[in-house]
Amino acid sequence: MTPLIAPSVLAADWGRLSEEVGRVAAAGADWIHLDVMDGHFVPPITFGPQLVSAVKKSCALPLDVHLMITNPERQIQAFRDAGADIITVHLETCPHLHRTVQQIHESGAKAGVSINPATAVELLGPICADADLFLIMSVNPGWGGQRYIPASTARIAQTAKLIAESRRDIYLQVDGGINSETAKEALCAGANVLVAGTYIFGKPDYKAPIELLKKAS
């Protein structure tokens, strides 16, 4: 199965964001990944719903919004109104995770749940019946350009097993240090959606790295 590729605009040239999004869409991207950071759950601060809205106007691809923020339930409707098609929250920030996932569904978006490298995969088990996507962070969230944590491969395989046991169609997404080599590891372990930032936006031609990721399986 050919994986879905979701370029992360965190690595794009924000001064030419509309052009950058158009280029990756023309190069074969499947989704656009937007990393929202609040300076609290993770150290950096990135952007809010206004930028998501601007990207929506520039692109017809699904917008995959990753909320690396505390109290994400307060912001779900704002991001949905801005054009988010998929909204992913961190298990670590949601004391009432089922309620938050339900809130995302009620907004009309698909619901994703992400976990950091030090969070036990087993904790995803109780939300298997409700989530549409699991995002395994293969780096500690916060900055682009980090190296893939090798232990992530086993965690992806463990998550793939949870999904298989649930008998549901849940996307298995991986984010962090993805390139043609680590993509092969992640896909062999069961991933089917790859987030890549610097590996794509760091190249002069966006089509070539996207094609390499698609062929990595």
Image: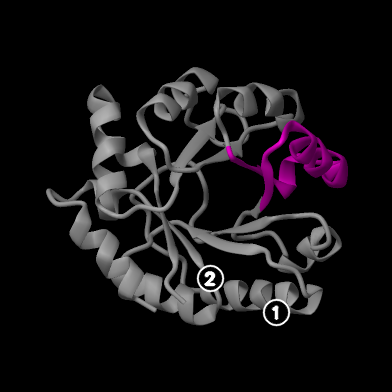
Residue at image location 27% in from the left, 55% down from the top: 199
Q: Considering the numbered disc 2 on the image, is that residue within a helix, a strand or a loop?
A: loop
Residue at 42% x, 37% y is: 60
Query: Residue 156 falls in which quadrant of the image?
Result: bottom right
Q: Tag 2: residue type?
A: Ala
Residue 94 among magenta residues:
yes
* Crowding near the residue tagged with mark 1, few <14, some 14–19, many ≥20 C-alpha atoms within 10 Å: few
Question: Residue 92: x and y, percent?
Answer: 73, 46
Element assignment for label 1: helix
C-alpha separation, residue under disc 2 versus residue under disc 1: 11 Å
Question: Which residue lies at the image location 69% right of the left edge and 31% below the top edge?
Answer: 70
Residue 149 position within the rendered picture, expressed as x and y whole percent measured from the top left: 46, 66
Looking at the image, tell me whether mark 2 or mark 1 is earlier in sequence order.
1
User: Quadrant of the rendered structure where residue 169 is?
Assistant: bottom right
The region drawn magenta spans: 85-113
- 161 with respect to 40 (left or right): right
